[in-house]
Image (cartoon, rainbow, N blue to C red):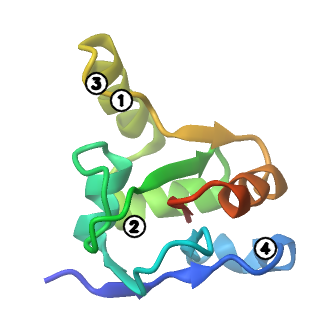
Amino acid sequence: MSKPYSLILLLGSLGSWSGAMAQDVVVVANQGVHVSEITDADLRAIFMGTRTRFADGSHAVPVTLKGGPAHEVFLKKHLGESPEEFRAQWRKEIFTGQGAMPKAFDSESALIEYVASTPGAIDT
């Protein structure tokens, strides 16, 4: 069984946590997300597009960084994918019309701003 991860409600910037994120990943969510835990299986389903809702039925909006250590650690540790595998899987979904890749951001600050203002948004 997958280990549950606590969802941290977004209350401020993660800028000061950047170094720690390279070793482990912090999951953040919009303040409106009422789910307090999420498993690797649930994260994978949401970020790979096979699920669009949290366990409580509320809408999930996955977002990612475009690259970097935190993005790579998240993909490998929680999705079991390399950045190339992640993009390739999403290209298939997009090409067949079965999904749209999660919105990706160049910086943590832009990502955090989006998560804070978007109901259901979740990021790592």
Q: Dot 1 corresponds to which residue? A: 90
Residue 42 falls left or right of residue 85:
left
Alpha carbon separation for disc pair 4 and 1? 27 Å
Q: Nearer the viewer, residue 103 or 75?
A: 103
Residue 93, by quadrant, is top left
Residue 93 badge: 3
Q: Which residue is mark 2?
A: 77
Q: Amino acid at mark 2?
A: Lys
Label 3: state its secondary structure.
helix
The relative height of residue 70 versus residue 61 in the rendered view (above or below) is below
**Residue 34 drawn at (x, y percent):** 45, 80
Task: Return the x and y of residue 55 as percentages of the image width and height.
Answer: 25, 72
Comes first in the chain, label 2 or label 4: 4
Position of residue 116 relative to residue 92, above or below, is: below
Pointers 2 and 1 in contact (CB under 8 A)? no
Residue 124 is tagged as none
Q: Residue furthest top?
A: 95
Q: CA distance from mark 1 to mark 3?
A: 5 Å
